[in-house]
Image (cartoon, rainbow, N blue to C red):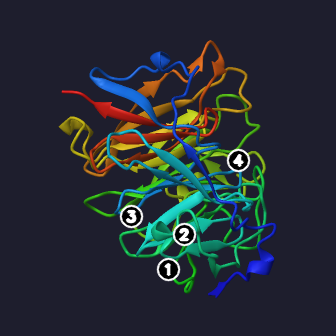
Amino acid sequence: MRAIRPGLLVLVLLVGSVSCSRVNGAPGLPLHQIHLPPRFEISIYASPVPNARSMALSPHGTLFVGTLTAGNVYAVIDRNQDGKADEVITIAQGLNMPNGVAFRDGALYVAEVNRILRYDDIETHLKDPPAPVVVYDGLPRDRHHGWKFIAFGPDGWLYIPVGAPCNVCERDDARYASITRMKPNGTRLEIFAKGVRNTVGFDWHPKTHELWFTDNGRDWMGGDSPPDELNNAPHPGLHFGFPYCHGRTIADPGYGKRRRCEEFTPPAVELGPHVAALGMRFYTGALFPDEFRNQIFLAEHGSWNRSAPIGYRVMLVRIMEQRAMAYEVFAEGWLHGGHAWGRPVDLLVMPDGAMLVSDDKANVIYRISYGK
């Protein structure tokens, strides 16, 4: 590991240019169009949060938010714990697609395309952040599917996906189209799962500690094929089919003759085609009714190349005895009249049981709560 010398930060991190903004409402956002189950409510937790993507929460309540196109990392503060943030602080700028954020032992970990950064003791320096330590800088540099969601698993390892650098292809470097993991200090990088085209969200079952993750299907096989996937990896070493097989049984037109679908671990759920399933979390709070406890919530970012748009919603996958039993709509309305005014990205369960949803199009973070 090494600290970045200040002289190298001109293009990477603009030290001393930390900006803060007071949180205001989000005028013009038609929240009334969002349909939720009875007694659930949606409100604005933080706005503006430009290009808000992946989220991580510290034990002290600081919400950290990564971005993709903005190149920023934010700290969102709710001082009085009233369910509405008071301030958004830009703690890093000019980074290379810093989508992923994770928090451990007082430090913020940030995933750029090719490296993992660590900001030590960050919460005491939100408005004067330290120079980051480079934990690991040996990841591929491809920007195609190069943005990363990161999280620490129950085993204490940091999990880091490496997307396929293409729509569909094979590469000699086995790290492509995989989920890797490493120790928090950047050592012992290894591949945990293979055949994963592009996952931008994963979580562990609160009881079994098994990994579940979303995976975005390939493009240019038509508007209705292939499906996106929700997968379950109970142990390392599994292969989930890419680039040879999509969904449970769809052989790839170019690579499908090389290996059969039966050789691979099938998805737990075939999701909608091109819905762009990104963030996923198990609901572990106590605010929602019991039927939602330990169930999976998915953020579907929405299709970009489908003639009839699909996605742009939050879905619920019901789990029973480690099997997915249902895939149903929980919140929808960001897609209205064929046009999307918002795009859900990531989800996070707060200590009070409310669920946050980031939106990189509307540039806000929502709060979904339940009133008894």
Tell which of 149 and 272 is nearer to you: 149
**Callout 4 secondary element:** loop
Residue 309, given in percent of the width and then of the height, sits at 65, 24
CB atoms of marks 4 and 2 within 8 Å = no
Q: Earlier in the sequence, mark 3 or mark 1?
A: 1
Q: Quadrant of residue 289?
A: top left
CB atoms of marks 4 and 1 within 8 Å = no
Q: Which residue is mark 4?
A: 252
Q: Is residue 169 above or below residue 223?
A: below
Q: Which residue is mark 3?
A: 234
**Callout 3 secondary element:** loop
Q: Earlier in the sequence, mark 4 or mark 1?
A: 1
Q: Which residue is mark 1?
A: 184
Camera-side mark, 3 or 1: 1
Q: CA distance from mark 3 to mark 1?
A: 21 Å
Q: Is residue 40 above or below residue 113?
A: above
Q: Which residue is mark 2?
A: 109
